[in-house]
Image (cartoon, rainbow, N blue to C red):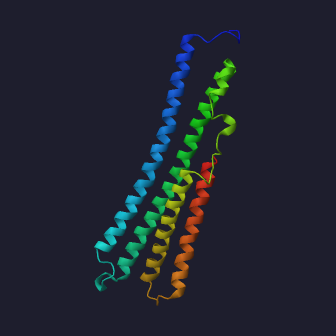
Amino acid sequence: MPENEPLPLEFDELLAAEYSYIAQTANQANEDRARVSSFYLIAVGSLIAALFGAQLFEKEFSSPTVYLMFSGLFILLTLLGTSTILQLARLRAAWYESAQAMNQLKDFMVSQNESLAKAFRWKSSTLPPKYKTNSVSYYQAIEVALIGGLMFGAATFFLQQAVPIRIGLLNWIVSAISGLSIIYLQLFLYKRKSLK
């Protein structure tokens, strides 16, 4: 088909259907991102409420077995946070792939009709990077990583409580360093998985 001839009607319909599908996948990635972080926040909130509801700080709850159990629960929440980080990274990458596909279609349409170039503000050249620290997805990852770090710090503290040693400043420092390490690790994983 010569380049100057307009596309047949069925091609226009195909392009419109493809563009609609890509737009839906981009929108779905954004919706899923909100659901994933909300699920994690609800899981953490529920456990914290259960801990305080069980009157954790009363004497009958101060046994090494109970402390080991709480440490295990906090480790589980840390792992759930890491899973949430990986899902957020994958959803950001999925949105990016959808945006690339949309721009590819727009580039094709512009190649067929140069006057369309003025209609599109967002182009392949203006697509934000896959890993962007000033994005909603990154802020959600920071939120999850902070909570994950807090959970791991608590797990470390309860694990130390289970061992019959005197709790002092060193135990708090070890717990804080453990939590900060998890925050760094989770944000590193988010960056690494976002760029794949």
| Image position, residue 13 (x, y; %) | 52, 17
Q: Residue at x 63, y 53 (%)?
A: 192
Q: Considering the image in quadrants, where does the N terminus appear?
A: top right
Residue drawn at x 54%, y 60% is: 142
User: Which residue is at the front of the view, 13 or 184?
Assistant: 13
- The residue closer to the viewer here, 196 or 138, is 138
Q: Position of residue 171 (x, y in %)?
A: 51, 83
- Residue 7, image x and y in percent? 61, 12
Q: Quadrant of residue 32?
A: top left
Q: What x and y, as percent, mark residue 160?
A: 47, 81
Image height of 165 relative to 120, above or below: below
Q: Is residue 168 above or below residue 76?
A: below
As displayed, is residue 146 above or below residue 189?
below
Q: Residue furthest bottom?
A: 166
Determine the image quadrant of residue 51: bottom left
The number of numbered badges drawn on the structure is 0
Q: Residue at x 60, y 51 (%)?
A: 193
